[in-house]
Image (cartoon, helix red, strand yellow):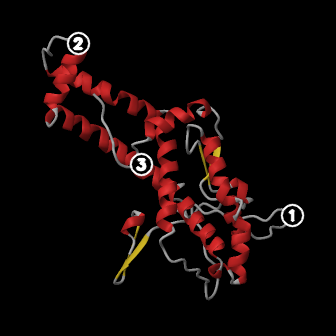
């Protein structure tokens, strides 16, 4: 008996198997904000040849951090644990195109060029998915899903669970603890894949592909500050909805207006 998913994630086992030979090929420090994007926020710093950004810790606003080049900020150690090198290669397919797209945006020609607008949409999708927010939501959903599905098996599908037990062992279960053990076994592989990082690896890839499709359906607008400059954070792409005087963020792309 298997817990099957016919929607998003239904190809997870196959994709995890495809990536198994690359599972140990990983990059330790992974940027959640592209260095190419961070470079747009740099400034010259005395006694250095490379422009720097000024990081701030919003949880400790009184702490003054040293300026750093883009390679030193916007990254998380082992953000994705399994086969992360291959995932970085996928991100690179978008990031390599960014200098040209940013140049077109500055020149005011990007919106008239379908290729440039496609790249800019892709970079929004990339930073929406490759983010701390996405991983936190992923962890939260998974840790709610498994106990809920286990309870569902032991209650709503107890007859099917018992039939699976009989098929495997022959004699019927002598008590509820034996069915509970079978339910735990059913979820054991998924839990193992969650802890070794392979489940996040395939989910983040699939979610990025879906985010690209959703972003392709939206009109692109490029904003410029009337004065001063924009700031950038560790989660630089947010889905935002405005209702009256209230601004809501941290939502799914499909919940955008």
Image quarter of residue 246:
bottom left
The foreground one among 199 and 135 is 199
Badge 2 marks a residue whose secondary structure is helix
Horizontal and vertical percent for residue 78?
Answer: 58, 42
Using a 10 Å C-alpha cutoff, classify the residue at mark 1 as few (fewer than 14 neighbours), some (14 to 19) or many (20 or more).
few
The foreground one among 30 and 53 is 30
Q: Report, in whole angstroms, how far the alpha carbon at label 2 lies from the one at label 3.
A: 35 Å
**Is 93 above or below relative to 111?**
above
Judge depth for marks 2 and 3 and give the one in front: 2
Residue 131 visible in the snapshot: no
Using a 10 Å C-alpha cutoff, classify the residue at mark 3 as few (fewer than 14 neighbours), some (14 to 19) or many (20 or more).
some
The foreground one among 117 and 50 is 117
Badge 3 marks a residue whose secondary structure is helix
Horizontal and vertical percent for residue 186?
Answer: 31, 28
Which quadrant of the rendered structure holds the C terminus?
bottom left
Which quadrant of the rendered structure holds the N terminus?
top left
**With 30 as the anchor, is 201 left or right in this view?**
left
Residue at 66%, 48% (x, y): give it.
89
Q: Report, in whole angstroms, how far the alpha carbon at label 1 lies from the one at label 2.
A: 73 Å
* Label placed on residue 169: 2
Image quarter of residue 148:
top left
Judge depth for marks 3 and 1 and give the one in front: 3
Q: Earlier in the sequence, mark 3 or mark 1?
A: 1
Q: Which residue is mark 3?
A: 138
Judge depth for marks 1 and 2 and give the one in front: 2
**Is 194 above or below relative to 65?**
above
* Label placed on residue 6: none
Horizontal and vertical percent for residue 241?
Answer: 39, 74
Badge 1 marks a residue whose secondary structure is loop
**With 199 as the anchor, is 22 left or right in this view?**
right
Q: Badges 2 and 3: C-beta atoms under 8 Å apart?
A: no
Q: Which residue is mark 1?
A: 47
């Amino acid at each position: 008996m298997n817990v099957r998913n016919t929607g998003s994630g239904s190809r997870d086992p196959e994709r995890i198997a495809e990536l198994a030979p690359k599972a140990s090929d990983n990059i330790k420090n992974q940027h959640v904000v592209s260095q190419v994007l961070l470079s747009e926020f740099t400034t010259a710093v005395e006694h250095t040849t490379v422009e720097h950004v000024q990081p701030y810790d919003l949880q400790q606003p009184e702490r003054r951090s040293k300026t750093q080049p883009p390679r030193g900020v916007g990254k998380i150690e082992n953000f994705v644990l399994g086969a992360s090198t291959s995932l970085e290669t996928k991100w690179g397919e978008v990031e390599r195109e960014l200098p040209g797209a940013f140049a077109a945006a500055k020149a005011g020609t990007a919106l008239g060029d379908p290729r440039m607008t496609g790249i800019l949409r892709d970079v929004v999708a990339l930073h929406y998915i490759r983010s701390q927010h996405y991983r936190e939501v992923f962890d939260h959903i998974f840790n709610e899903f498994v106990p809920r599905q286990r309870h569902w098996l032991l209650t709503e599908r107890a007859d099917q669970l018992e039939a699976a037990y009989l098929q495997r062992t022959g004699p019927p279960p002598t008590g509820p603890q034996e069915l509970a053990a079978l339910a735990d076994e059913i979820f054991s592989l998924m839990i193992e894949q969650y802890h070794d990082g392979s489940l996040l690896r395939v989910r983040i890839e699939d979610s990025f592909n879906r985010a690209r499709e959703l972003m392709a359906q939206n009109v692109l607008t490029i904003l410029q500050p009337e004065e001063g400059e924009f700031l950038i954070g560790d989660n630089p792409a947010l889905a935002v909805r405005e209702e009256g005087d209230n601004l809501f963020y941290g939502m799914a792309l499909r919940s955008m207006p």
